[in-house]
Image: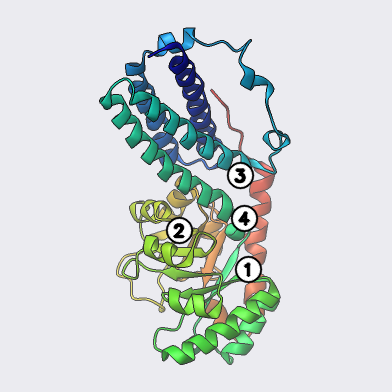
């Protein structure tokens, strides 16, 4: 490796390490996601190992920052970031660019390190995609506290009046859950729900049917473990759509996040007549999910105003409710009651806070 190649390797190795450190620290301190943090740390160590074949000592010794013409060239955009999400996206792009340069230079040295860096670059692409999706979608669902599932057969009042009532009470997301309607009728109902949610500033979700979600202009879709895979739905709906996935354990939840889920439904929390579930995941799973995942977790299953505090006690900030709201004579009152309890707990969590120490 000649002097020029050594300087290129040194510069891009520094860029890649710095980018990986930014991403790693984001997953550690902002997302509190041990799995993603470990994947990035492993990628960083694997990259360092692959670079050893390029004689990094010689590359460092070839460094000449004083006379480097590139150090004096910059653009205004380099010094502007709107938020932490912009920092993460920029670091992801910097990583992929640096790894590509390193791979190309490695080809002039030996095939083995070039092949190793190629695989590291592919792994970097996947992690960049996951983190970009998280930072770009987090804001859309982060503020959802109460999420109502709407099924006409379970409504005490006509479903249109129930929808109007829950939206008027401040519900931030509504899912249309109708398993037995003909497609034409489901599409018509979905369009009405989307219009009402849009006017109220709420998120509209269609259960199981990405095709209906697209045709109705809904914000997204919710799928279960036996429905279309999350990755396939993400491919159909694009990166901006809200996609939720029902999960009963952390393995399912982590798989959903990796496949592109905006949020995960965790449950069932309590016995429910909506679905026949022989096993309850319970509040213990909700606590694990809230503490171990980087996307919003929505507790679901048998939740009422009477038991919601069992969930807020373990850190749950968002719940999905069906019969306890839409089957009530006054669905707006039940929504306000649940939202009040959720709001009280969120306020307590903000007041207490959590300090994190960097090493």
Residue 172 badge = 1
Category of crowding for the residue at label 2, using alpha-carbon neighbours closer than 10 angstroms: few (below 14), some (14–19), many (at least 20): many
Give residue 159's position: percent from left, percent from top: 57, 88
The label on residue 139 is 4
Earlier sequence position, callout 3 versus callout 1:
3
Whole-angstrom CA distance, mark 3 to mark 4, is 10 Å
Q: Which mark is first along the chain, 4 or 1?
A: 4
Say which residue label 3 marks.
85
- Determine which residue is flagged by label 2: 261
Pick the front one: 232 or 144 = 232
Mark toward the start of the polypeptide (3 vs 4): 3
Residue 340 as seen in the image, left or right of residue 314:
right
Q: Among all residues in the image, which is located at the extreme right?
A: 76
- First-in-chain label (3 vs 2): 3
- Which sits in the foreground, 118 or 4? 4
The residue under the point 59% across, 79% down is 194
* Residue at the image position 40 percent from the left and 79 percent from the top: 273
Q: In terms of secondary structure, where does tag 1 sit?
A: loop
């Amino acid at each position: 490796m000649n002097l020029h190649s050594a300087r290129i390797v040194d510069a891009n190795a520094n860029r890649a390490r710095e980018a990986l450190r930014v991403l790693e620290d984001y997953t550690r301190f902002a997302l509190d996601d041990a799995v993603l943090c470990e994947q990035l740390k492993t990628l960083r160590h694997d990259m360092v190992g692959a670079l050893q074949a390029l004689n990094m000592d010689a590359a460092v010794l070839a460094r000449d920052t004083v006379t480097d013409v590139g150090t004096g060239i910059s653009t205004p955009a380099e010094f502007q970031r709107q938020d932490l999400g912009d920092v993460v996206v920029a670091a992801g792009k910097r990583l992929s660019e640096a790894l590509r340069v390193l791979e190309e230079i490695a080809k002039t040295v030996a095939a083995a390190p070039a092949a190793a860096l190629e695989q590291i670059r592919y792994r970097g692409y996947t992690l960049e995609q996951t983190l970009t999706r998280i930072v770009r979608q987090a804001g859309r669902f982060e503020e959802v506290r109460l999420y109502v599932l709407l099924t006409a057969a379970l409504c005490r009042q006509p479903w249109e009046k129930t929808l109007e009532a829950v939206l008027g009470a401040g519900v931030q997301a509504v899912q249309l859950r109708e398993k037995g309607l003909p497609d034409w009728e489901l599409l018509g109902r979905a369009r009405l729900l989307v219009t009402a949610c849009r006017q109220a500033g709420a998120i509209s979700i269609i259960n199981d049917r990405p095709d209906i979600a697209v045709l109705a202009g809904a914000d997204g879709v919710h799928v279960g473990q036996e429905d279309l895979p999350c990755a396939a739905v993400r491919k159909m709906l694009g990166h901006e759509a809200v996609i939720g996935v029902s999960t009963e354990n952390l393995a399912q939840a982590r798989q959903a996040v990796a496949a592109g889920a905006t949020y995960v439904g965790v449950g069932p929390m309590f016995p429910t007549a909506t679905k026949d579930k022989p096993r309850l995941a319970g509040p213990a799973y909700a606590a694990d999910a809230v503490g171990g995942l980087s996307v919003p977790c929505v507790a679901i299953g048998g939740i009422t105003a009477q038991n919601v505090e069992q969930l807020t006690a373990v850190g749950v900030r968002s719940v999905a409710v069906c019969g306890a709201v839409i089957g009530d004579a006054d669905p707006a009152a039940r929504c306000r009651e649940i939202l009040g309890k959720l709001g009280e707990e969120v306020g307590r969590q903000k007041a207490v806070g959590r300090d994190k120490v960097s090493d």
